[in-house]
C-alpha cells in the first residue's frame, strides 16, 4: 500500500494554515470581539513584540476586520501583556498564558544570563538580586535606570528579565484612539508579571 509523503510545498502550506495565514478568521463585530482577539493570541502561543507595532501587523494578517484599537484595549485592560519569554525576547501573550509560560522558560533564562553577562554577574547572589529588583518594581512600575538597586549598580539593567518582570505600556499603547505612536524600540516602565496581571 503506497504511503503519501508530504512534499516541501505541502509542509509550507500546513505551516501557513496552522499560523492562520492562509485563511484569516472573521472577527465578530459585537460581544465576543475582545475574546476572539485573545484566543488568536493564545492559538499562536504569543507574537513577537520586541517593538510595539509587530503584534498589530500579525493580528491584522490573521483576523478579518481587525483594528488597532482591538489590541490596544486588551493591553490597557491587561488581558494581554508583553513579557520576556522565548529566546529572552519580548512576546505578546494573554494574561492567562503569561503566568503559565514564564515559569516554564525561567530555567532557560537563568542559565543564559550568566553566559551573556559573565563578569557583570560574577560574585552576585542571583536570588537576592531578583528579590531586590522584584520588590522595587512591585512597589511601583519603574524604568530600567530606576530599577538598579544601589547594592548592585554594576549588574546590567537586564536583570529584570531574570526577576520575572515585564514592560508596562507607558501611557496608552499604540493604536488607541487619540494616542500618538511610540517610537519603535522605546521602553516604558517595568513591573512584575504577577502584579500586573492580578
Image (spheres, rainbow, N blue to C red):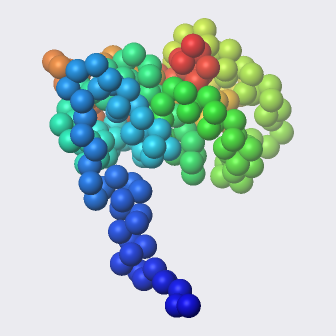
Q: Residue at x 69, y 36 (%)?
A: 103
Picture quarter containing residue 193? top right
Classify residue 169 as left or right of residue 3.
left
Classify residue 159 as left or right of residue 74.
right
**Quadrant where the N terminus lies?**
bottom right
* Residue 46 in sight from this viewpoint: no
Query: Compared with residue 140, is residue 98 higher up or lower down, i.e. above or below?
Result: below
Instruction: Spot the residue most to the bottom.
Output: 1
Q: For this rendering, which residue is in front, 21 or 2?
A: 2
Give residue 68's position: percent from left, percent from top.
Answer: 23, 31
Q: For this rendering, which residue is in front, 111 or 97?
A: 97
* Residue 115 in sight from this viewpoint: yes
Classify residue 32 as left or right of residue 147.
left
Give residue 59's position: percent from left, percent from top.
Answer: 30, 42
**Quadrant where the C terminus lies?**
top right
Q: Residue at x 24, y 30 (%)?
A: 28
Query: Compared with residue 120, is residue 75 higher up or lower down, i.e. above or below?
Result: above
Give residue 13's position: percent from left, percent from top.
Answer: 35, 68
Give residue 153's position: percent from left, percent from top.
Answer: 66, 28
Amino acid at each position: 500500500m503506497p504511503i503519501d509523503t508530504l512534499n516541501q510545498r505541502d509542509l509550507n502550506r500546513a505551516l501557513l494554515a496552522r499560523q492562520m495565514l492562509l485563511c484569516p478568521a472573521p472577527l465578530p463585530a459585537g460581544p465576543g470581539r475582545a475574546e476572539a482577539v485573545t484566543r488568536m493570541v493564545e492559538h499562536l502561543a504569543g507574537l513577537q513584540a520586541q517593538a510595539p507595532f509587530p503584534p498589530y501587523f500579525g493580528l491584522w494578517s490573521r483576523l478579518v476586520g481587525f483594528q488597532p484599537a482591538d489590541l490596544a484595549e486588551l493591553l490597557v485592560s491587561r488581558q494581554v501583556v508583553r513579557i520576556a519569554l522565548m529566546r529572552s525576547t519580548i512576546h505578546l501573550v494573554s494574561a492567562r498564558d503569561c503566568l503559565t509560560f514564564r515559569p516554564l522558560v525561567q530555567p532557560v533564562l537563568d542559565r543564559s544570563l550568566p553566559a551573556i553577562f559573565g563578569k557583570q554577574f560574577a560574585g552576585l547572589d542571583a536570588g537576592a538580586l531578583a528579590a531586590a529588583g522584584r520588590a522595587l518594581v512591585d512597589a511601583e512600575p519603574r524604568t530600567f535606570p530606576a530599577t538598579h538597586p544601589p547594592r548592585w549598580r554594576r549588574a546590567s539593567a537586564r536583570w529584570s528579565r531574570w526577576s520575572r518582570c515585564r514592560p508596562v505600556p507607558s501611557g496608552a499603547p499604540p493604536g488607541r484612539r487619540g494616542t500618538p505612536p511610540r517610537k519603535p524600540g522605546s521602553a516604558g516602565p517595568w513591573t512584575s508579571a504577577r502584579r500586573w496581571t492580578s
